[in-house]
Amino acid sequence: MDSTSSEQQKDTTSTVDLEKTLEESFTTSVQSFPGVLLLSKIVEDIMKYFKITELIKSATATRKGIDNTPTPEIKANLEALVDSILDPLREAYGKPIIVTSGYRCQRLNKAVGGAASSQHVSGQAADIRSVEDTPAENKKLFDLIVALGLPFDQVINEHNYDWVHVSFSPRHRRQKLKAEKKGGKTVYTILK
């Protein structure tokens, strides 16, 4: 072996040793400092196209001082919603999708006038829209959810595609609905 090969091998060995030392050091730091563990947990919360923070943010909660932090069970529901519906939809749509409402704790749900049985309360639903926020683009999202055969529980055309409500739950009812105001109340019609 010539001296150049020997030096390259030393450099490679040093790099591997350094990476191993840094990894072990980071693992020890994570165990020693809860703040680092929290940071690593936040990094894990980033899914392919969405973040948990997008699904729990609420201007109403902020304005009214409502803590909208999900429990671990609700967080798992949100992750299932993203993995099963939102990420595959975003991938197929090819453009960003805006979540206008995701998880709502009971207090927040009441503050926004949500139904007591809303799947938003269990972290199983999201209201979404296109970046363009036009009925035509929002309809594309609705139609794509159905055409892709995504395992939705409900998909709702809200008020002539002002937004689209989509949910994922073990019920898998695959309900397609239309919501519209009639006499001051929201009325739901089942679509074929």
Image (cartoon, helix red, strand yellow):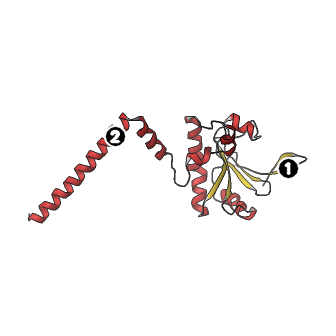
Estimate the x, y position of residue 46 in percent, counting from the top left: 51, 49
CA gap between label 2 and label 1 equals 55 Å
Horizontal side of residue 174 vs 159, given as left or right = left
Classify residue 159 as left or right of residue 182.
Answer: left
Task: Sort mark 1 into few (<14), some (14-19) or many (20+) by Cα contacts within 10 Å.
Answer: few
User: Residue at the location (19% across, 54% down)?
Assistant: 13
Residue at 59% over, 43% down = 78
**Residue 19 vs residue 125, the one in the foreground:** 19
Q: Position of residue 151 (x, y in %)?
A: 63, 50
Secondary structure, mark 2, is helix
Type of amino acid under label 1 = Lys
Between residue 9 and residue 28, name the one nearer to us: 28
Query: Which amino acid does the dot numbered 2 rest on?
Result: Thr
Give the label, 2 or 1, closer to the camera: 2
Q: Quadrant of residue 147?
A: bottom right
**Residue 4 sits in quarter:** bottom left
- In the rendering, which numbered label is found on residue 181? 1
Residue that label 2 marks: 27
Side (left or right) of 186 relative to 135:
right
Give the mark nearer the N terminus: 2 vs 1: 2
Residue furthest out toward the left: 2
Residue 22, given in percent of the width and then of the height, sits at 29, 46
